[in-house]
Image (cartoon, rainbow, N blue to C red):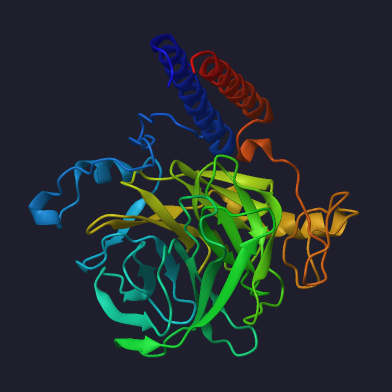
Amino acid sequence: MLSKRGEVVVRVFAVACLTVATVLAGQGARAGDGEGVREDAGHGVRADTGDGVRADAREAEGGEGTRAGDEREAGADDGARILFRFKDSRITESSGLAVSPTGKDIYYTHNDSSAGPVFYAVGPDGRTRATFTLRGAESRDWEGMAASTDPRTGQGVLWFADIGDNLEGAWPDISVYKVAEPAVMRDAVVPAVRYRFRYEDGGRNAEGIMVHPHTGRLYIVTKQFAGAVYQAPKRLRTDRVNVLRKVGPAPIMATDAAYAPDGSSFVIRTYFSATVYRAPGEQIARVTMPELRQAESITYTRDGRYLLTGSEGSRSPVYRVPLPAAALGASEPASALRQAAPTPTSDTTGEPVPTPVAGARSGEDGEDAKTAGDGAEAGVPVLAVLLWLVIATGAIGTITLIARKTR
C-alpha cells in the first residue's frame, strides 16, 4: 500500500490528468466543430455537459406543449423548426433517424440499447404508423440507422447499426442489419440480413452509420476524442467478418452521420454541432444545431435542402434545420474538383473517396485502404495529444517509484 504522502502525489497526478483530458475535450470540440463549446446568445445554443446529457425542463401542458428552450431554438435566427415530437410512449431513447426513401411522410427511428431489435415508422404528426421487429436479430447496442435505395430494383433499404461499444473493444465484432423497407405500414416481423464487422486497427465505440445513395457502400463513424470514418468493403459477406478500413478523420465525439440524397456530400453530427464534408477530411460547411437533451441522430430530408436531427428522451422533438448555401451547392464544386484534380476523388460510380497515401495497405476486397489528411480540425490536435501522453507517462512513472519506496 502507498504511504499518505504517496497517496497525495497519486491524487495530484490524477487531478492533473483529468484536467488535461478536459482541456483536450474542449480543444477537440473547437477543432472538430468550429462552433465548439460556446453559448450563443442569439438562440440559446449551449454545449451539453459530460456525455451530452442534461436535464430537460418540464414540458408545458403535460408534455404536448413546446418548452421555453425549444422556442429559442426554433427562432428566426437559425431557421431551425420542430418538425414533430414522437408521441409513442415506447420511443424513449431515439438513437437513429432516417427518412423513407420511397414512402411519403414516413420517418423511421429506433431506441438505444436494451430495447430489442425493433424500429418504428412515424408520420409527420409524430404518431407511430407501424412497429417492426427484426427476425433473428440482436440488439446489443443499436446506435444508428440509415436508409438507401437499391439501384437495381428501386426498393428502399434500411440499415440498423449494432455498433455501440462503450468499453472500446469489448466486442470481438459489431453487426449491421440490412432490411428491405416494408411496403405496408402495418405491424410486422421482417427478415434481416446480418453483416458482421471488425475494425482493421482494433475495437472502437461508434454511433454513426451512413450509406452512399448510389453505390450502397457502408461507412461507420466512430465516437471518440479523435474519431475516424471507416469504410466497409464494396461487397459485403455474410459468411465471414468484414474488415472496416480507416479512410479519414471525424469530429470529436460523433453521434451520427448521413449521406446527402445526391451523394455529393455527407454530414457528421456531434453533441455540439454538425459538419458537412465533400469527402473524409474535406470540409464544406459547419451547421449550428438546436439545443437538445442528448443529440443522437441526424439525416437529410428527401430533397436534400434540410437536415433532420433528434434526441433521446420521452416525447423528444425532431428538428428541421436548413443547410447553408455552401452545403446546398456541394454537388457542383465536387464535380469541378473531380475534373480538375490530378488524383481522382471518386471511384467509377462517383462516390467521394479520400486521396491515397504512401504505405496504405491493401483491403480484403482488393482495393487500397485510403487515408485522408490528418484533418486536425476534426479531432484532437496532435500537440495536445502529445502533451497528454507526456503527463500520463510522468504520472505512471511517479506512481511506480512511490510504490517501490513504500512497500
Quarter of the image that includes the N terminus: top left
The residue shown at (19%, 66%) is 89
Judge whether residue 262 can be spotted in this image: no
Residue 43 location (% of width, % of height): 34, 36
256 above or below 390? Answer: below
Q: Residue furthest left?
A: 61
The residue shown at (34%, 61%) is 94
Front residue (pair 100, 138): 138
Residue 235 location (% of width, % of height): 70, 77
Residue 330 location (% of width, % of height): 65, 55
Rendering quarter of residue 124:
bottom left
Judge whether residue 350 can be spotted in this image: yes
Q: Residue furthest right?
A: 342
Front residue (pair 161, 17): 17
Q: Residue furthest top?
A: 5
282 above or below 392? Answer: below
Front residue (pair 107, 312): 312
| Image side of residue 275 versus residue 84, left or right | right
Residue 248 location (% of width, % of height): 69, 50
